[in-house]
Image (cartoon, rainbow, N blue to C red):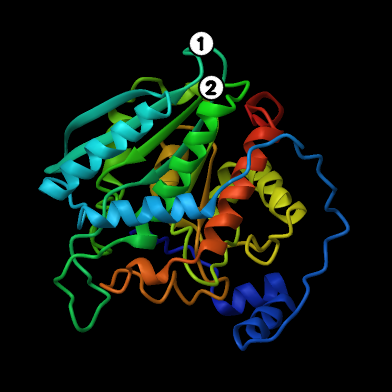
Amino acid sequence: MIYFSNIVLGFRGFALRAGVTSLIFFFQACGGEVNLPASPSQKKLSLAASRPHFSSDSAYMWIKVQLGFGARIPGTPAHQACGDWLIAELQRRGARVYEQKGAYKGTPIRNIIGSFGSDTARPRVLLSAHWDSRPWADKDPQSPTMPVPGANDGASGVAVLLEVARHLAQAPLAYPVDIIFWDAEDMGREEVEDSYCLGSQYWLTNPQPHLPAAYAWGIHLDMVGGRQAVFPQEGHSRQYAPLIVERLWGVARELGYERVFVALPGEPITDDPYYLSSKGGIPMVNIIQRDPMGRGFFPEWHTVQDDIPVIDRSTLQAVGETLIAFLYSFSPQTLSPH
């Protein structure tokens, strides 16, 4: 998957920042029940009543289909077959599909872009996930050289966006949206700088079919299907897209998912959105599973156990329903920080 920045919130600093909230999460981790009180500054949001219904069953099925191809390692037959399937699925949903093929830092790249809505000068929205899987399970003490199935780390975000794409075809938004599946995100080593996120870095060198300036903002999904997942407000998202973060977590709160989308500052993570924001100027939000106490991503991360049993439909539902409600309730113009 990815690695997190050296500038992190350690437990001590986090406790000073969050105060008693850290004790609340400790209590939750031990199986306790607790209700997080709403901040006095939180305002009730008006959500579109006619928005589509997100199906976690469909998203779950799309994860299983991806895993059925095998490990989606760039340059392998399984990777080629899965990419062909993703293109066909986007086309089936009415998208104009573009492939960006090339090589970056010695790795073959195949970014897949599905465009919905007209290609006009109007501000666009970018939705993304990475579709490759990690070649080696370096966090698995028993099988460190085996490939990672990538059910949560990769396939879950793609699956949610495929279900979103189905709704974009049936109930088009009033603004254009691009769904980009980034390749070669998970080829990196923690000790090698900029070795992760090769697909998005490559796109920034020659963006297509639209320049970064065409996007008002974007939302990235990574590891969005795990059991008992928690999504704090990732650090770079808070830095580059604070208004989008505030509104998106507010939508989750209105839907009753405040214990999944926790309104607490998270660690800054070097993931695709970091490059898109810092180098491309796109205000990106990263919805990514991370323990608020700094204990890592999810237990099966970068192991051979990141397979279909780690997926929880209720997590997929929380993420997908929140994303759908957000997209159909707000426009790029009302949320653009430009």
| First-in-chain label (1 vs 2) | 1
Outermost residue on the top side: it is 120
Residue holding disc 2? 176
Q: Is residue 207 visible?
A: yes
Kind of residue at badge 2? Pro
Q: Is residue 259 left or right of residue 119?
A: right
Q: Residue 144's quadrant in the figure?
A: bottom left
> Residue 95: where, in percent of width, then height?
41, 24
Viewer-proximal residue among 156 and 194? 156
Local SS, label 1: loop
At a point 55% along the width and 69% down the height, the residue shown is: 9
From the viewer's perspective, is residue 105 above or below residue 92?
below
Looking at the figure, which quarter contains the C terminus?
top right
> Residue 101: where, in percent of width, then height?
19, 30
From the viewer's perspective, is residue 212 above or below residue 229?
above
Outermost residue on the right side: it is 40
At a point 57% along the width and 71% down the height, the residue shown is: 292
Local SS, label 2: loop
Q: Is residue 142 left or right of residue 87?
A: left
Mark 1 crowd level (few <14, some 14–19, many ≥20, 10 Å Cα): few
Label 1–label 2 contact, CB within 8 A: yes
Viewer-proximal residue among 260 and 90? 90
Kind of residue at badge 1? Thr
Q: Residue 136's quadrant in the figure?
A: bottom left
Specify the label residue 260 is tagged with. none
> Residue 27: where, in percent of width, then height?
67, 86
> Residue 126: where, in percent of width, then height?
49, 33
At a point 68% along the width and 60% down the height, the residue shown is: 257
From the viewer's perspective, is residue 167 above or below residue 25?
above
Residue holding disc 1? 120
At a point 25% along the width and 64% down the height, the residue shown is: 191
